[in-house]
Image (cartoon, grey):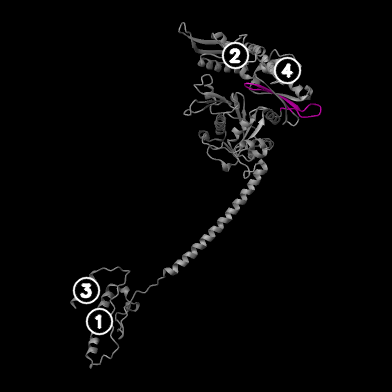
Amino acid sequence: MSLLSSSLARHGRRRLRPTLAVHPPPPFFASSVDNNNDDDGNQKHHNLVHIQNQRNISLLSRHYRGAHDDCLPIHQHHNDARPEPAATAYHVPTRQYHTTAKREILPLLAVGFLGASAVYTYRTFQQMDQDWEDYYDELEEYKAVTGIDPEKQDLGDATTTASSNASAASNNSEDLSSFFTGGTLAIDMGTSRLKLSHRSSLANKSQYKNGKPPSPIVSVDREGFRSTPSLVWVPPTAEEDMLIGRLAESRVYDSKGGSIVHIGYSTEDGTMNEDAVQRAIRAVASNALDQVLGGSNSSLGQNGNPLFVLDASMSMRGSYNVRPIFTHPPNYEHLDLYQHAVNSLTSPGGIAAFVPEPVAVISGAEYYNLLPPKNTSTGSSVLIIDVGGASTNVSMVGDNNAEILHSAQLPIGGDTFIDVLVSHLAKGFFDQHGNSDDPTETPASLSSKPSLNDPTALQRLYEAATTAIHELSNKTRSEINIPYLTMDLQTRQPKHLEVGMARNVVDAEVETWIRTKLVPYLQTKVGDNLSPTALSQALPPPTNLSTLFSSAIMSALEQTSHTPHMLRAVLLVGGGARIPLVKNAIREGVG
């Protein structure tokens, strides 16, 4: 009993977990023999053992009933009297609760997971089918408008795409432009200046006035200029960055080991610096579009992304949903190289339109109602004289306003007046000057640009001469003042240039250059059959600018079998057309 009491005491002090049911050890079971059988001593011994075990179990049950009532059967919570145990066996009470085996739960979880997966997969396939149908609908619409099938055509081969779709893009410009939410950007790659104009999207009907789409607006860069020099300075090493526009113009007279690339013109070996052209177009176009559309994508100009994209959903940082239209000189010999460089900036290739400059002039004149209406009494052809920076193009456009019947180029433009003025200033200020009158110089070597040993002084002369020519377009006299232009080597004193320049002086210098340089140069080229259509063979050699234009216009009429009465109009365009001498010469040349 002492052992049992100490065991009970230890169990009483131990705090059991409330969720665990402690059961007493199983009792000894006596055989079912009559307890009154006193004849058998062993039987009595077994009965006594059974009774003793019953007492021990009763004590254990009372102890656990007091400490853990939840371990007792339900009927013992309401009745303290414990029922008499059966004579054959004693059943220890257990906790009553419900459990579910794992083998019953796992199948249910598997069925639920499979059902949810089946529903999700079904809905995913439904959405994929819908997206696929929408994609093909948009693809068919895109192919119908552009004529490009992206699934069958290599978009990387921009040259083939552009050459086969340039005319189609020009004819469907309005339909294709409706796909661009950013509108249209026209880029004029001039001989000396690059100009851009932007028109809002045709899909934005709110900007229409009297049923007409919004008018194009000439783009202005951050510095406030309406044009950018079409120059790129290529550094001698890869560690330096290219300079574009005005920064490159400052290196024209002192290249510092690099080279100057004129956009749109090939080098001496007949190739084109495609990287320089792409960088220039990206920088200038991004600058202009940032001013019109807002944003700062120009800082990402060299990120490798396409500059122009077809759809707004294809736009990314550094890209614009704007349709580009590039104008180029007629009969441009490097058009394929130029197209390849431009189409590398578009996605997909072929969305850029390439329009000859005379055709673009006709479209602009009709938009602003500058041409007389067509009728049977007058002709339908248009003569266009485009006076650019470095050259002048004389073109004849046919009845349908898209066919160029004739085009000839004269190597004279607005920059010629600047070159001649710098030469005139250098003659009176320096011992050496640009245009030497050395009779040993061959007439075929045409050059109006002066040369000086001091590149800084030459640059300052050009800046002052450019300002003076612009002023002389509106005034008859301009003052030129360049302090500290150079240093007197004998007296060690600075020399300043202060001179007043009259318009008549500049005009006389230009007329002299035409008579002594340009006309002999053109006659030499005619003799070599290199440019037989520049001057008329029926007129005498030109002696001034007026007779030069008369000969060029007569040559255009002769080559196209036209008479002056068959012309619908004569259009004078280009930056150099603002010069009074040019306007008066063409007026006299046309008669």
Q: Which residue is mark 2?
A: 421
- The residues colored magenta run 370-397
* Secondary structure of residue under mark 1: helix
Q: Is residue 139 left or right of residue 23?
A: right
Q: Identify residue type, mark 2.
A: Leu
Find residue 180 and report its horizontal and vertical position in percent. 61, 39
* Quadrant in which the C terminus appears: top right
Mark 3 vs 2: CB contact within 8 A: no
> Compared with residue 549, is residue 495 higher up or lower down, i.e. above or below?
above
Under tag 2, what secondary structure? Answer: helix
Q: Nearer the viewer, mark 4 or mark 1?
A: 4
Q: Dot 4 corresponds to which residue?
A: 551
From the top left corner, tell me how far across and down residue 274 is, in percent: 57, 30
Within-10-Å neighbours for mark 4: few <14, some 14–19, many 20+: many
Identified by mark 4, the residue type is Ser
Residue 24 higher or lower than 384, as above or below: below
Q: Which is nearer the N-term, disc 3 or disc 2?
A: 3
Assign a secondary structure to mark 4: helix
Q: Is residue 38 magenta?
A: no
Element type at marker 3?
A: helix
Q: Which residue is mark 3?
A: 7
Classify 10 Å Cα crowding around label 3: few (below 14), some (14-19), many (20 and above).
few
Which residue matches tag 1? Answer: 53
